[in-house]
Amino acid sequence: MNTEHRSGCPINLSLEVFGDRWSLIILRDMIFGGRRHFREMLNGSLEGIASNILADRLKRLMELGLLTKADDPSHKQKAIYSLTEMAITLVPIMAHLGAWGRVWLPVSEELSIRAELLEKGGQPLWEQFMDELRHEHLGLPSKTPPGMPTVRQQLREAYEAVLARKAEAVPLMP
Amino acid sequence: MNTEHRSGCPINLSLEVFGDRWSLIILRDMIFGGRRHFREMLNGSLEGIASNILADRLKRLMELGLLTKADDPSHKQKAIYSLTEMAITLVPIMAHLGAWGRVWLPVSEELSIRAELLEKGGQPLWEQFMDELRHEHLGLPSKTPPGMPTVRQQLREAYEAVLARKAEAVPLMP
DNA sequence: GCAACTGATTGCAAATTGCAAGCAGATAGG
DNA sequence: CCTATCTGCTTGCAATTTGCAATCAGTTGC
């Protein structure tokens, strides 16, 4: 890991970690999209990341301690990437970034519904989400009751509801 | 302003605004360091920004609507840069970034004391700080009582207290 | 007059990015 | 088997961005 830092300022050091155009996008897809494999991230990315950049950033994020990599038992060449606690605690920052972008930037409705939900849910929802991520990526026991819908499910359903409503309002095949 | 976006996702759009190594550093120095002039930012920057990059980013941040520029009456070639409301509402994000960096990255004590104070103060302190920034940069009437120390003063005093304590513990000139 | 200061700009080498193609090994279907 | 597809990842190359030093013209204080 690179130990040359521009300064010891917390904001600067945070920027050195994900102050580029791709690192946070990758983490976003892992956190909110549940992606764990190279191809999933490569093909599922809305923004169209290039494979060499993805490989480079995954390596870098591992060196920085935000991700770990393990073999996937289902396929000998498949690797599963997991978030570390360090990355999971980015959830509040993601929520704030989304909330800020929703106010000031030309977001699309279907892609911003998740940010809206996350903003309205506030700290308690973020805590529940981080708990779920710890269960999913670190194998910790989840505190979420079995019957309760997961945060990712809630986000997904809200997203699909918007899509359905838009499809009805402006039908592609009347 | 560039209108080509990679996607309408709020997080992506936010990253397109300050997903680089310098934009947020400049805003940090303006917000927390109170810098308003080109030279102040150029020479005062801990991280050593180059003048062409600074000029480019100031221009870009103006085009994006985060900064405005006005003539300084005291010097015909001097320009004063002001934060817009859009930039002022980044304070909570800065606070979270600082808090995260303080936990996970090798921050220096004297530079992280401000992040610690901002974290402990929470939303109420951020609101007061944003109110002060609106007064300073937008000319709005401040709601802060006259006798009350400003947030920037508090941050500055805490920073200097740490410096003084460290100087005593490890004196340069015994 | 002149040095210091103002917000920049320029030229150039180095690093980073984006894109397409290609890689070897693993697996699935016929 | 045999081939087609999938796996994570690498390579080559052009285009862009960055970092650094030097420079600029106008302004100010002395």
Image: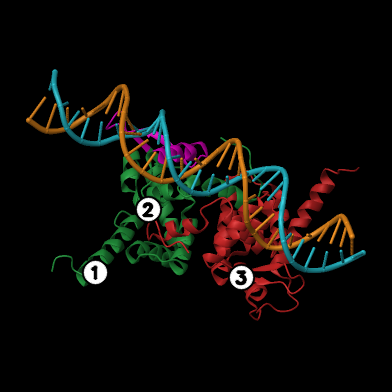
Chain colours: A green, B red, C orange, D cyan
Residue at 22 percent across and 72 percent down: it is A169
Provide the chain ID for the residue under circle 3.
B
Nearer-the-camera pick, B62 or A111:
B62
Q: Nearer the viewer, residue B43 or A20?
A: B43
Q: Is residue B107 among what the camera can see?
A: yes
Q: Position of residue B70 (x, y in %)?
A: 65, 72
**Tag 1 near tag 2, CB within 8 Å:** no
Name, please, the residue furthest toward the bottom. B141
Tell me how far mark 2 sits from mark 3, CA to CA: 30 Å
> Looking at the image, which is closer to me, C22 or A90?
C22
Q: Which residue is mark 2?
A: A32
Q: The disc numbered 2 marks a residue on which chain?
A: A
Q: Which residues are magenta?
A: A52-80
The x and y percentages for residue B155 are 71, 62
Q: Chain of mark 1?
A: A
Task: Tell if the residue under mark 1 belongs to the same chain as the one under mark 2.
Answer: yes
Residue denoted by label 3:
B130
Distance between the alpha carbons at the discs numbered 3 and 1: 38 Å
Which three-letter amino acid code belongs to the residue tagged 2? Phe
Q: Please, what is the three-letter code of the amino acid marked with disc 3? A: Met
First in sequence: mark 1 or mark 2? 2
